[in-house]
Image: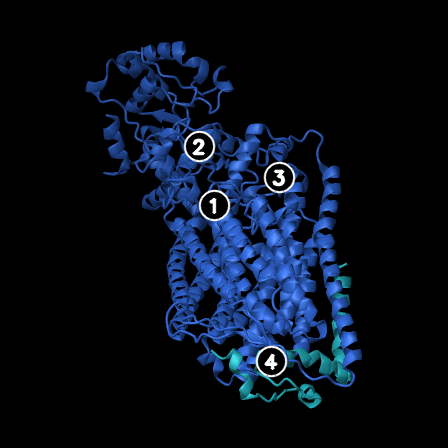
Chain colours: A blue, B cyan
Amino acid sequence: MTMAQPQRGLVPVATKLVRAHTYAAFAGLMLSALFGLAVSIKFHVPEFLTGHSALTWGRLRYDHTQGILYAWLGNAFLAFLYYAVPFLSRRTVTSERLGWGMFFVYNFVAVLGGWTLVLSGVLQPLEWAEFPLIIAAVIETCFALMIVQFCLPLLRCGASELFVSGWYLLGGLTFTFLAYPLGNIVPHALPGAMGAAFSGLWIHDAVGIFVTPLAVAVEYFVITAATRRPIYSHFYSMVGFWLLFLVYPLNGIHHYIYSSLPMGAQHVSEAASIYQGIDVILVVTNLLLSIGLAAEGSVLRDVPLRFVWTSIVLYLIVSIQGSVQAVMSFNRFIHFSDWVIGHSHLAMIGFASFAAMGGLGHIWQRIPGVRHSRRAMAWSYWLLILGLGLMVVDLTIAGLVEATLWQRHLPWIDSVRAARPYWVFRTMDGVILLAGFLVFGLSFVTGPRNPEKFLGVRLDAKTGSAPSEGRASYWFTTAYAATFGAGVLFFVISFLALGVYPAMSLKKRIQRSTPENAQLALTPAEQHGGKLYAIDGCAYCHSMQVRFTASDRWRFGLPTQAWETQEEFPQMWGTRRIGPDLAREFGKRPDDWQLVHLYDPRYLVPDSVMPSYPWLFDGGPDRPTQNARDLVAYLKTLGRAQARLTPVSAPEMYVRPVATGTSDLAEGRQVFLANCAGCHGVEANGKSIGGQALRPVAFNLTGFHLSDDLIWRVLQTGVPGSSMPTWNELPSDDFQAVADYVASIGQAKGLADKERQASKATLLDAGRRVFETHCQRCHGADGKGDGPDGLKMLPRPANFHEMMPSYPAAAYILRHGVPGSGMLAWPLLTAPEVQAVTCYMRSFYGGSKTREPLTGGAASRAAEESQ
Amino acid sequence: MTAVILGAATLILVALIAWRRISREFYRRSELPKFQVLANLGLGTASLSDRDISKHEPELPTEKGTDEEHQP
């Protein structure tokens, strides 16, 4: 086989670079999709790949999105650029040698280097900007080189003759170069809310300024080349182009609606988002008319054109969806849920990837000497349509379910349980998508081989001139140049309106509103914990911004104020809630709960999907490394400044005694298993792994009669000083049911005559003496848990007027103590003394003693175990 | 601020649309690039007439002999 020789009069296309970037794009697509699939599996198999920090959910998720953006779409667009720029400009790209240098730097330094550094924990927790700063600098350099490589020949072409694809390429590369530092560098210099304003710009610009223009450029190019007809209206295609670049940068802050960012900036982003939808309708109408007028069935026959047609339709859908999501009343409901994940997949696969695939498929059919299989590409199209359709519908429904549950007074974990089936289904959809990508790649290496020939653009392909060519051309060039300059100016305005203005406004507000004694500074250990929090992607599941909405206030507490965030470098507000928001985590959980939860969340919350972090421990939850301690120290700073300034209000209490035994105990057991068994154990005896790792250890509910008031109070307010949280999020029926169940499982029978060491009167008298000697200082003279030493303790010592221990349970505690509480072991007490003091303690009890025990269930087994 | 920015952008574009409706030359020039790219791709003629460009729904004559470069 001989290579075709260059021909005179033809501008060569750098086909080797096209091929190199195409292969790199396919490799990037497969790896990025595999990262995504692993992330998806972890939602329903949380222990999948948890052995090493490099494979934790957060880091794989970072590599998934960065891989799609740079490894897949970046390379695909570069391949397209090398092919299309000569056809658009009738000029070669600036330098093929520069192209090869850029190819190696982009793929082996930026992409592979970025992936590797992220997996090893060197990264930044900024959405769509996760590669670390050193990689960000390399990518920014590559964008600059891309301008040299591609924009110079396009500019030499002359503005008045430049096809709209060329304009999109010019705009995409130029504006991305300008926007990239805003999201990747500026947030390091501006903390919290101020940094969030800039992050918001980049989150949207990554899609709107980089991906969208290049994808639309592909669409216009492929439509023209495949239909062999001019597009419907070049003028309206330019109107759409200018509107995109004028309006898109104004969208950014719509990711932080109802936050503490200035409301004016939020309204700008909302209005611009709606305007953007109108622009997309214009662009899509022009594109579809271009296909419709010319295709005459070619959409069905030409598979790359079919990809492009689909991407146009999905561009319309996803853009209108995006506009609707930015409307504040809807955003209040749907934000943070899987709906948004469905939206982003529709954008990045349905719109951008389908356009890129159409572009690659189209040019591959024209690259000399390569194989291409139309059949395989057609198969990949249908696999991708199926996988994407199912995924988007699935995630959209999941988002609606989650959002609905978040509006209701339900425990957070209920939304996780409800979403789990959808996450399983999402993985299945992901497998179909992966198969589609694989078949798409196969279509590039199978099938008949294209003939070897020289691929180039005719230099004499110049349309004729009208008499007024010179003057009109001058005015057009001037007008387009002025408009392009205005576009850059407008970008600067958007930068000022949505970045600088909010930052300055926030700075003033922060200076004005920061309380004098606010404790904002972090210790070195807390700062180190914050870095650990960032590198494992915690903020990608747990947002750190309580919004100014009713449901957020109810569930998480006071909305996050701008002044609270002035030490957050960089901000980690997040745009997703798989777990609850953590902005008000201060004081909610004791350290041991946090540690056990980090070691294995399912020890305490059986239905949790949070990853385990065993590498932060030396083999067990009670052996945390310094990293684990620092991470917990950081968690305890979240909301600390606000909490210490806000007077603690008395918790709402149920004052009326509530009758128990009115609900179904089987239902109560289900509620118990779903919410309580993680710590208290399935048998309610506190013997679970997680429960025993807590300090104090989880309470043995089977060994005590508990008064109704105590049960209700503990469920309402938790137990201060322990890991027992409040459960007032439970629906009232569930609350009643679990309270009844807990009341029913307590076993505190009296002694049989043959077990009694002495008469009851003797036992009481002896028990009183033992109590006064050993117990009174903490439990109080009357056994109310209010002794002088006990008042200094958290949790408070037991109040025996509300709980009556069984003889075995009391004996066990006296022998072993309650680790993590003020209750010590009393091994020197003899068995008769133990029996006597237990008898005395039981005599205080004033609650119900006549509950029916469960038959054959947890209670009886626990009683046997105690015996 | 928002209204001014979006309003100004809209007005400029409306003015351009109106100009295009009024001026034949503007119309011709604004549609020229879509024919130029066809010629670049080897799918159209290299000598377009004013008549071809100014037709609202262009029926661009395709010269089969120039299609070679862009055929699979």
Q: Secondary structure at mark 1?
A: helix
Residue A451 placed where, x, y %?
Answer: 43, 76
Nearest-to-viewer mark from 4 and 3:
4
Quarter of the rendering containing residue A698: top left
* Left or right for A661, reference A150: left
Give the CA separation, mark 3 to mark 1. Answer: 23 Å
Residue A652 appears in view: no
Give the CA separation, mark 1 to mark 4. Answer: 44 Å
Give the CA separation, mark 2 to mark 4. Answer: 66 Å
Query: Badges 2 and 3: C-beta atoms under 8 Å apart?
Result: no
**Amino acid marked by disc 2:** Leu
**Same chain shared by disc 3 and disc 1:** yes
**Same chain shared by disc 4 and disc 3:** no
Give the CA separation, mark 1 to mark 2. Answer: 28 Å
Nearest-to-viewer mark from 3 and 1:
1
The residue depicted at 71 percent of the width and 58 percent of the height is A491
**Label 1 sits on residue:** A116
**Same chain shared by disc 1 and disc 2:** yes
Give the CA separation, mark 2 to mark 3. Answer: 24 Å
Quarter of the rendering containing residue A422: bottom left
Please, is residue A787 above or below residue A609 in the view?
above
**Label 4 sits on residue:** B38
Q: Which mark is residue A607?
A: none
